[in-house]
Image (cartoon, rainbow, N blue to C red):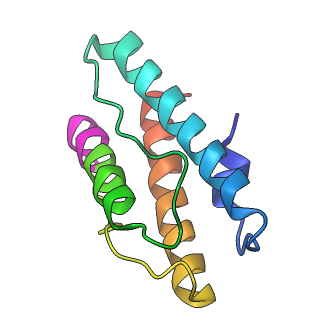
Amino acid sequence: MPLPWIVASNPDDKELQQWAFEHWQDHLEIQQAILKQSGINLEIQVIYPLNFDDPDEWLENHQLMHNEMNGLLKLNGSDLSKVDFTNDNQRNVWIWLNGQEHRAVRQALAI
C-alpha cells in the first residue's frame, strides 16, 4: 500500500519522484476500489511522472481526480490545484492536505 509514502512529511528533492510514483499508485488503487464497489470507472489522469519545474497541468489533472472521487463519495476536499513545490512549507502543507484526502477516501471505501 503506497499510502505511507504519500503522507510522509517533508520528502527531500530526491524523494519527490518516489513520492510522485507512490502517490500515483495510491490513486490507481482508489480508482480500482471505486470501480469494484460501485461499478463506476473514474478516469485516471496523467499524474506520473511529475514535472516539479512546471507542475500546472499536473496540479489540474490531480485536482480533477480528487474532485471526482470526493464527489462520488460525498467527501469534502481541499483546493489542491496550487502549490509551489520549491517552497518547503507550501509543499509540506500540500502533502499533508493531500494525504488527509487519501486517508478519508480509503476510509470511506474501507480499503
- Residue range corresponding to the magenta coloring: 67-75
Q: Quadrant of the N terminus?
A: top right
- Residue depicted at x 42% and y 67%: 55
Image label count: 0
Q: Is residue 9 magenta?
A: no
Q: Position of residue 16 (x, y in %)?
A: 68, 63
Residue toward you, 4 or 106: 4
Q: Quadrant of residue 58?
A: bottom left
Dominant SS of magenta comes to helix
**Residue drawn at 40 percent across, 41 percent down:** 46
89 left or right, relative to 67:
right
Q: Position of residue 54 (x, y in %)?
A: 43, 70
Observer-nearest residue: 103 or 90? Answer: 90
Q: Residue at x 30, y 55 (%)?
A: 63
Q: In the rendered image, which quarter is residue 74 located in?
A: top left
Query: Left or right: where does residue 48 sit relative to residue 59?
Result: right
Q: Quadrant of residue 14 in the image?
A: bottom right
- Whether the magenta-drawn stretch holds residue 71 is answered as yes
Q: Position of residue 20 (x, y in %)?
A: 60, 52
In this rendering, does residue 74 appear at all?
no
User: Considering the image in quadrants, where does the C terminus appear?
Assistant: top right
110 vs 6, left or right, is left
In the rendered image of this protein, does residue 76 appear above or below residue 89? Answer: above
Instruction: Please say if 48 is above or below 57.
Output: above
Residue 98 location in percent, x, y? 48, 61
Q: In the rendered image, is residue 104 in sight?
A: yes
**Image point (28%, 29%), residue name:** 43
